[in-house]
Image (cartoon, rainbow, N blue to C red):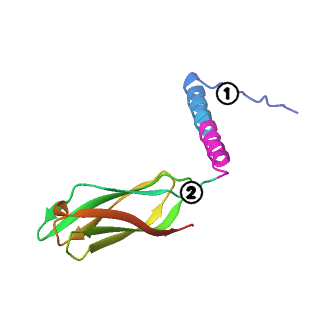
Amino acid sequence: MTTKKKRRVEKNWLEWTVFGVGALLVAGTLGFLIYDGASSAGEEPPAVKVELHAPEQKGEQFVVPVTVTNEGGATAEGVTVEVTLERAGAEAERGEFAVAFLPRGGKREGFVTFRTDPRTARLVPRVLGYEKP
């Protein structure tokens, strides 16, 4: 009866380097996910902030870029943002848009349009509401 010896293959330095880098990436990702999950255990609700930017004239209308940021600890869905253009002695003009999904720490951009030049009036932004996913 013959017995075969198992031949052991030695790994070269490149294989060990790739293995080490892969192991570090997996361990780092796992560590981050565990930390993120543990630190968000006492989540605070979404804190949606609205920031207006300089209006631009596009043809016969004025476009106002809007940045919506979630500074809270939870995700907000279906965020509705309203921007009101108020002028003395004139009826207020309103524009609104919706953001489907705004994760914690997330930022989205949208636009509202007006017929009246916003540079000659006061713009008032506000969040009308959002849903908890």
> Does residue 126 appear left or right of residue 45 in this picture?
left
The residue carrying mark 1 is 9
Q: Could you say where residue 97 lies in the image, as x and y percent from the top left? A: 35, 70
Lower position in the chain sequence, tag 1 or tag 2? 1
User: Farthest residue in the left direction?
Assistant: 59
Q: Nearer the viewer, residue 86 or 68?
A: 86
Please say if 33 is above or below 64: above
Kindly identify the amino acid type of the residue bearing the numbered disc 2: Ala
Crowding at mark 2 (Cα within 10 Å: few <14, some 14-19, many 20+): some
Q: Position of residue 129 (x, y in %)?
A: 47, 69
Q: CA distance from mark 1 to mark 2?
A: 51 Å
Q: Quadrant of the C terminus?
A: bottom right
Q: Is residue 6 left or right of residue 39?
A: right
Tell us which disc is closer to us: 1 or 2: 2
Identified by mark 1, the residue type is Val
Residue furthest to the top in view is 13
Which residue is under mark 2?
74
**Start and end of the magenta stretch?**
27-42
